[in-house]
Image (tube, grey):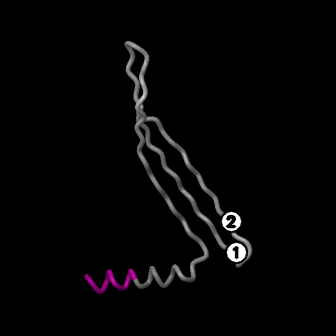
Amino acid sequence: MKKTILAVAALTLGASAFAQAYVGASVGRGNVSVDCDAGSSCDNTGTGFKLNGGFKFNPNFAAEATYSTSEKQT
């Protein structure tokens, strides 16, 4: 098991030195403390996520794209 983990880590670190493309993601949850109208209830929480990726074409030119959104919990 330890040999497998060590081999995967070595391949990952070695491949990243030559990688020209990447992908990333993040997720988060938020809560806002605000007053609601009297007699009504409101939800002040939400979840958001972001996806990003890029590619290096040559040492002088690269492109990156990001998509992000947030969703209000109901």
Across and down, in percent, residue 22 comes to: 56, 69
Specify the quadrant that holds the C terminus: top left
Q: Which residue is mark 1?
A: 57
For label 2, the SS is strand
Q: Residue at x 46, y 35 (%)?
A: 72
Q: Which residues are magenta?
A: 1-9
Q: Is residue 4 magenta?
A: yes
Q: Nearer the viewer, residue 4 or 13?
A: 13
Across and down, in percent, residue 28 comes to: 43, 48
Q: Residue furthest top?
A: 39
On screen, 42 above or below 12?
above
Q: Earlier in the sequence, mark 2 or mark 1?
A: 1
Across and down, in percent, residue 57 comes to: 70, 74
Q: Nearer the viewer, residue 4 or 50?
A: 50
Q: Residue at x 47, y 55 (%)?
A: 26
Q: Which residue is mark 2?
A: 63
Q: Is residue 30 magenta?
A: no
From the viewer's perspective, tell me whether residue 5 is left or right of residue 22: left
